Image: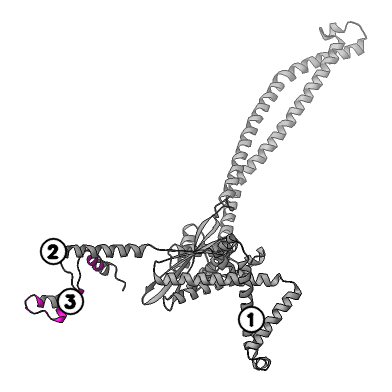
Amino acid sequence: MKTRAAHYENVSRNARRKVSRAEDTKRTLRLRLHHIQSVTIPVERKEAAKLLAAAIAERNCNTDDISSVAGTDSPCDATWRLEVLGEKERSTGALKQKLRTYQKSIRILKQRCYRAPRLRAKAVDKAKSKALQQSAEGLRRKGVYTPKTRALVRALVHGGCSVSHVGGVMREIGKAIGFQIQGKFDKRTVARINLEGGIASEMQIAHEMENSASITLSGDGTTHRHTNYEARFAAIPAPSYSPGDSSTSVPQMRLLGVDSAVDHTSQRQFSGWMKKFDDLTTVYGNSPLASRSGSSLLPADIAQKLRGMNGDHAEDQKKTFQLMKGWKEETTQLTLGSRELLLKPSAELFAVLAEATIAKVAAAGGPEAWELLSAEEQKDHDVNMLRELYQLLGHESYLKLSDDEKRQLDLCIWAGCSMHKELNSVKGGNTSMMGWWKEHGVDGPVLLANKDNDATLQGASSSTAVTAAELRALEVSTCGGVKATTLAGAIFNHKD
């Protein structure tokens, strides 16, 4: 709209300048024409009259003294002056024609200047109406919210706007900039747009995992209102996505999700990782991105690219890492075994499968027992047979690898958080300091007992015999900086 208005303003200004220049030219031409008419033409007319009289006298009298009739001019001079007069007449006609042309141009430019404000106002109104129409229809295209609209909704939610107030905020923004936003965004629509953004992020993470050579995982858990929550992250070499630089890979931290869990056991954490990998690979496998790029990602691919894990320096995290490492080793053997089986010649492949099938039927109790099994049970036996065969061939293939190749496949490092080590050092330092007080007979800090133990100990101060309850209250009550810090945390940052 502003561009159209500026265009018509430039057209109007140029037209005014052309009118001014045409007026100047018109005045110049009028001055020249007036000069020619007032000076040149009268003189030439007098000269022409003399020449004409001389010519007439020559025809009538047929004498040689033409000069006595026409003055001092000869017949040759008369002819030349007639030619000059004709040239002046033609020049005057050309100037008059040019003057008429400039006058016509001036009239046209004046009409343009007269119409320019109306055209400009009409263009502004048309641009405004078009902008209002686009603003009313720009949020949707054929009844579907556009990608830009969805990105705006996610940006508002990411910035802290409540899902139930996104529609109102967008209407107020449109009103402030002069656009009328029709329709409404209810919280269900906003929630679905956010869900689509989550699916798109899973596609991006899976695509980055598929293109990376190594992956490092990390996770942590906490409780909120007696519900366990597990947060999972992945460090992936991925493009920086900066403008003009899409080839440089830098370490990127990707949030895989924050999910609730039944408990915080190592087996539950391991199952959560497996479910997360299944979800990522399923979403990516069904996405248009994988279809266009012709790529695929399986949990086995993630296992081969896994290079390390990071977590708390706790026993449950150590066990979780051992489970993940065992899954990586098992998956590596299965991958090597399947690759080895596919590379075998047809005759050898048939022999291996026949031997494994005979062993499978024998393990089921013989041919008669095998026939009595249902289709699902036979399928389970087939899957177990192939799995055992893959593991056997994979182990043999692994033993044939070089040390560098084995190290590349086995590399998986665990790094624990040092927070618990630091807490242990504080606890050990506090215990040593309290022991030093007792050894040197120094009175330590005041005893910080809770209200129940404090009442029990207050009763013991006036009695001579110490009861079992008083002795226990004295033993469980502590003092010092650690106890003071614990009390401050309970007061200012209580979990409930």
Q: Is residue 106 above or below residue 371?
A: above
Mark 1 or 3 closer to N-term?
Answer: 1
Q: Which residue is mark 2?
A: 443
Q: Nearer the viewer, residue 75 or 429?
A: 429
Q: Main secondary structure of the magenta part?
A: helix
Where residue 65 sits: x, y (%)?
Answer: 88, 5
Amino acid type, residue under disc 1 in the picture: Met
Give the residue at x 10% y 78%.
Answer: 459
Amino acid type, residue under disc 3 in the picture: Ala
Q: CA distance from mark 2 to mark 1?
A: 73 Å
In this rendering, would 197 be left or right of 311?
A: right
Q: Nearer the viewer, residue 85 or 361?
A: 361
Q: Which mark is residue 473?
A: 3
Where residue 326 sits: x, y (%)?
Answer: 52, 72
Q: Secondary structure at mark 2?
A: loop
Q: Secondary structure at mark 3?
A: helix
Give the residue at x 8% y 80%.
Answer: 465
Q: CA distance from mark 1 to mark 3?
A: 64 Å
Give the residue at x 35% y 65%.
Answer: 420
Inspect this view and state whether residue 471 appears: yes
Q: Quadrant of residue 285?
A: bottom right
Say whether residue 323 is magenta: no
Query: What are the residue bounds of the magenta stretch?
Result: 460-487
Q: Which residue is mark 1?
A: 385
Q: Quadrant of residue 224?
A: bottom left
Say whether residue 470 is magenta: yes
Mark 2 or 1 closer to N-term?
Answer: 1
